[in-house]
Image (cartoon, grey):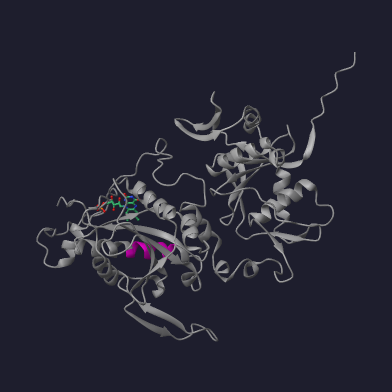
Amino acid sequence: MRAPRKKPTRKVAPDIAARLGHRFSLQMQGDGNIAASVGDYSVNLGQFSGAAMDHARHLSTGLPLASFAGKSKLAREIDALVHRLARHGLLEYRLSSSRDGPDLVVIEPQVPDYWPRRAKLSSRDTVVLSRFAYLRRRGNEMVLESPLAGALFRIGDPAIAATLATLSQPQKLGPKALSFNLLLLELLVESQILLKLDAKSGDGLRVNEGDGNLVLWDFHDLVFHTRSTEGRQANPVGAAFSYASVVPPPPAVRPRWPGNKIALRRFPSLEPNSLLPKLLRERHSTRDFDDKHPITLDELAQFLDTTARVVSEWKSGPYFDGGPEVTYSTRPYPSAGSAYELELYLAVSNCEGLACGFYHYDAGQHALVAISASAQQLQALSVAAQFAMDAPGQPQILITIAARFGRVSWKYSSIAYSLILKDVGSLLQTFYLAATDMGLGGCAIGTTDIDLFGKMTGLELHIEGPVGQFALGRGKKPEFQG
Ligand SMILES: Cc1cc2nc3c(=O)[nH]c(=O)nc-3n(C[C@H](O)[C@H](O)[C@H](O)COP(=O)(O)O)c2cc1C
């Protein structure tokens, strides 16, 4: 008897299939509504026809994007459903050489509006890896990432990792570029993980990748910036207690060193002989603001004048032969290298004498300049701050501290981003002390959304972006408890 022939796997044209992330499931409801859920959280995606519901079931294994690219009613319904799922961050995209074959690559979106797009490549094109691209182990997977990319690529086939390794040097595609590879390469170029070289870009080395602002970024600094803020990554951010069950909490106060102890005299905190100890003792975080008696424009002006206004400007000679003269400023808080790269953007929700809106503080002119941002964006910014503070309402004024990164990285290598964060710390304490002195309330906020800020200002993430936030207003009641 002849052994039954193995059923051939149906080869399909290389395509990208949308697939529901493994943590999510779809609920098809009797009234035609489809909901996606994870644990207790569920989101309604709208009402669909029976045919669309049937088709949508394939989303658990992968629905080729080409299968709903047409203009039919069904295709349009599926397209709407898939885009809704994508906007909620519930999809990943799988690349395989056959419908039933293993995942060769899985694309995990990192920004809310990611959609797999392909740059156009031809056999005459030359491509090379971006200097910001990196492969690393995540769990038992190999992931290809870049702080510039809107998605990461999970590499399921070691041969792809080998191909990527060859792309550390420019490679001309040539006629042999396999169609599957071409699809992946086009997706990677669109995600800025690969660069398509043109006549001006030489070997695509640091000075030829992107604009001057990008040239100044060190690799680790841009990774740190995009991975320690919200908006450009899908990892959990903030108090997630991820390894709390594995590692006990470190103590609040460091255990004593074993050497001789020299006890120091204590100074009574309630009878300070100068204003500073009193201010330092009274300083505290205020999260609940008195919206019936909001901060006034005059108070805001005084706060900014005290903490952030440019006091004077001066010039230094060139640092090296043929180098430019550099202009510096003096301001009330310290700044590494006197760079003063930090800029203040104010989302005003409730300030007497100042219209709600988004403003830049011009520290040189001591003036506010309105920036047109949509009401939804302002709301999203304030609500995120309220959430971060676990506060009962939105802050009257939310100050976003943004950095002009190049102002520091033009001079400093390796330490630029860390210097910026240290500058943020000194500005935050200056804010706290000024607010305390003026009888106002404030609270530092540890999270910022760099994607939202980019959309509100039109500034690219590597040029100027948020590195800190401070909520300011009139506190509801004295929270100081001595
Ligand atoms: C860098 C930094 C980030 C902070 N982030 C937050 C935050 O996201 N949410 C919040 O409610 N408080 C935040 N705080 C405030 C601290 O929780 C607060 O300073 C701390 O609990 C001590 O309380 P106190 O400021 O009233 O003395 C932050 C403070 C700093 C310095």
Q: 343 or 34, which is in the foreground?
A: 34
Question: Magenta span: helix, strand or loop, mainly?
Answer: helix
Within the image, what quadrant is residue 133 found in?
Answer: bottom right
Task: From the top left corner, tell me how far across and down residue 371 is, in percent.
Answer: 43, 65
**In the orientation shown, which residue stands out farthest toward the front?**
73
Residue 183 versus residue 356 in the image, above or below: above
From the viewer's perspective, tell me whether residue 169 is left or right of residue 59.
right
Within the image, what quadrant is residue 475 found in?
Answer: bottom left
Q: 223 or 96, which is in the foreground?
A: 96
From the viewer's perspective, tell me whether residue 406 is left or right of residue 161.
left
Task: From the top left corner, tell me how far across and down residue 412 is, in percent.
Answer: 48, 71
**In the orientation shown, which residue stands out farthest toward the right?**
1
Task: From the top left corner, tell me how far across and down residue 385 is, in percent.
Answer: 36, 51
Residue 67 versus residue 182 in the image, above or below: above
From the viewer's perspective, tell me whether residue 277 is left or right of residue 340.
left
Residue 424 versus residue 325 in the image, above or below: above
**Residue at image point 53% right, 48% down:** 112
Image quadrant containing the N terminus? top right
Residue 424 in the magenta stretch? The answer is yes
Q: 347 or 156, which is in the foreground?
A: 347
Q: State how many labels appear.
A: 0
Residue 328 in the magenta stretch? The answer is no
Q: Which residues are magenta?
A: 418-427
**Residue at image point 70% right, 55% down:** 119
Task: From the top left corner, tell me how far across and down residue 271 is, in percent.
Answer: 9, 61
Within the image, what quadrant is residue 369 found in?
Answer: bottom left
**In the orientation shown, which residue stands out farthest toward the top?**
1
**Residue at image point 34% right, 44% down:** 250
